[in-house]
Amino acid sequence: MIQLPSGQHITYQLQYRKCGKTSCGTCRDGQGHGPYWYAYWREGSRLRSGYIGKVHPNSLNNPVVEEPVPALI
Ligand SMILES: [Zn+2]
């Protein structure tokens, strides 16, 4: 978990990311891994970003995990 600045305006974006492995079928056949939440904020004049994860930070108190329910075999 990254340390998000307090008192800053933080923008959250849901994004896919590619891991860069040539052997990864997820990236080769699709848009990459995810979607995961990323946070963006300004630190001075620099745009910073940080990986958050599958759960939006505002829903951490009441997590909504958007994963398929594993099939019972
Ligand atoms: Zn990959």
Image (spheres, rainbow, N blue to C red):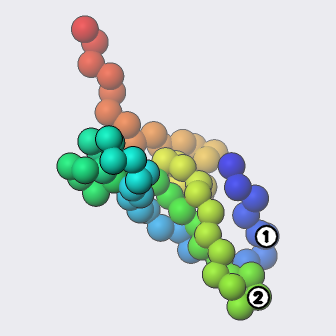
- State left or right for residue 49 relative to residue 70: right
Is 9 positioned to the left or the right of 38 in the image?
Answer: right
Left or right: 62 in relation to 68:
right
Q: Which residue is mark 2?
A: 44
Amino acid tagged 1: Ser
Picture coordinates of residue 48, whole percent (x, y)? 65, 75
Circle 1 sits on which residue?
6
State the SS at label 1. loop
State the residue lying farthest toward the front.
Answer: 22
Proximity of marks 2 and 1: CB atoms separated by less than 8 Å: no
In the depicted structure, whether residue 58 falls above or below residue 6 = above
Q: Give the camera-side residue of 54 and 19.
A: 19
Distance Cα–Cα, label 2 vs label 1 = 14 Å
Q: Position of residue 49 (x, y in %)?
A: 61, 69
Which amino acid lies under the numbered mark 2 shown in the image of this protein?
Answer: Gly
Left or right: 18 as drawn, with respect to 50: left
Judge whether 48 appears above or below 59 on screen: below
Which sits earlier in the primary sequence, circle 2 or circle 1?
1
